[in-house]
Image (tube, grey):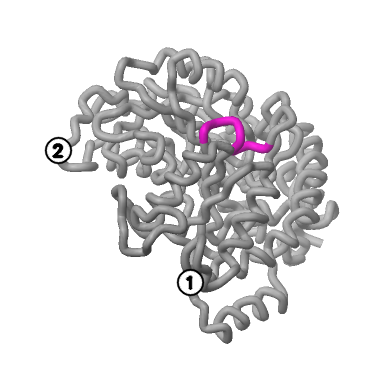
Amino acid sequence: MSFKQEAKRQFPKWPIYDSSEVEALANVIKSGNWWCGAPGVHQGENVWKFQEDFAKFQGAKHCIAVFNGTVAIEVALLALGIGLGDEVIVSDYTFVASASAVVATNAVPIFCDIDPDTFVMDVNKVEGLITTRTKAIVPVHLAGNPVEMDKLMEIADKHNLKVVEDSAHAHGSKYKGKHVGNWGHAGSFSFQASKVLTAGEGGAVITNEDELADLIYSISDCGRKKNGYGYAHFIYGTNYRMSEYQAAILLEQIKKFPAQHKLRNQNAQYFMKKLNNIDGIRVMNPTPGTEKLGYYVYPFIFEPEKFGNISKLEFKEKLNRNEIPTDDCYPPLHRLDCFKNMDLRKGIDYSNANWGGTKSDDKNFPIVSDIYSRSIEFPHEMLLASKEKLDFVVDFIKSLK
């Protein structure tokens, strides 16, 4: 049987749902309570219940649900006092939202290169980026792989910096006994359609600080005070509230998550051993101290010379033509036109940033530029497949040599 024929055995599709999600949405519609209301005067109950469940799930004291992961970062930074002209250090290998949320606060993102083994922020490079303008750090747990948060928090404490963990990929990831999102002052999450916990859209911020939690809530709910008069707006705020529809789906999805999370981690280890045994293939290495990984995507890099000098695009096309799914890798932030051309907020001085114009040259970000040029990602749902299907992928990659 050819690889093409063999590959027609379908990999799992995402999202995975059943009648429970359909019933949950129908119940919201029938209730007539299509928004959550306020802490003291509930309209619907799904948002409030999900906040409790997700906080418990991530081992945090507080959870504030919002409508996507981008504004989750933004509202956390605003609540921590980040604003005009402040510099915020961000991993260079991430989705644009990790930096655009910084831009939205009128602050300036500063890009940090990555570790060549773990593909996440190289903590050893952080102090070299700190200036008198630095006020915060946004470490990104790419593909669910934790940044070395113990070391990063030592640096943050030393320089009196705030830390917002971008945990959009890292639901359930655990590092040195603590779930990610709990190491910093706050942790942000996304429930966008492709995420391992999804409602199509949605986001959340977790924190263990009472006053910060109240402030994050106020900013995300039009500047209101908890249990205060609804038309009293005591600080600047905007409407970032999650809907009852999103929360209803998430309450069902979070029930399914533990079994999926366990299977992903088991299959990821199995897959890693098989792939790493192929000469010229290396899978992202879990950060030492990692106990569980969210595995939003499953990245690996290849050595072109070991595969007949095949290009990254050709490698992906061969996989896709044989119905092996892949995900696009994020272009490093320094390469994006909006940063190269400094086409961002009007009136903000970006001249001190470590990107823009010639500063955005790949030679200034050598590790991430190299990793990106040779990396391919499998979607997380592949890790829910049988070992037989994972073996097929391994055999197909071997056939390309």
Occupied quadrant, residue 175: top right
Q: Residues within 10 Å of mark 1 (few under 14, many from 20)?
A: some
State the count of labels. Answer: 2
Residue that mark 2 sits on: 347
> Image point 45% across, 54% down: which residue?
226
Residue at (24% x, 22% y) in the render:
352
Image spot of residue 21 (x, y percent): 66, 74
Q: Position of residue 307 (x, y in %)?
A: 63, 36
Q: Residue at x 64, y 49 (%)?
A: 55
Q: Quadrant of the C terminus?
A: top right
Residue 306's disc number: none
- Rendered view: 11 above or below 345: below
Q: Nearer the viewer, residue 279 or 28?
A: 28
Rendered position, 27 above or below 82: below
Residue 246: say if magenta. no
Which residues, given as a range, are shown in magenta? 179-185
- In the image, which disc is placed on residue 35? 1
Determine the main secondary structure of the stretch shown in magenta: loop
Q: Report the residue at 62% width, 68% height from top.
A: 249
User: Is residue 352 visible to us here?
Assistant: yes
**Amino acid at dot 1:** Trp
Question: Where 56 falls versus 364 (above or below)?
Answer: below
The x, y position of residue 82, in whole percent, is 34, 34
Q: Is residue 294 visible?
A: no
- Towards the viewer: 84 or 385: 84
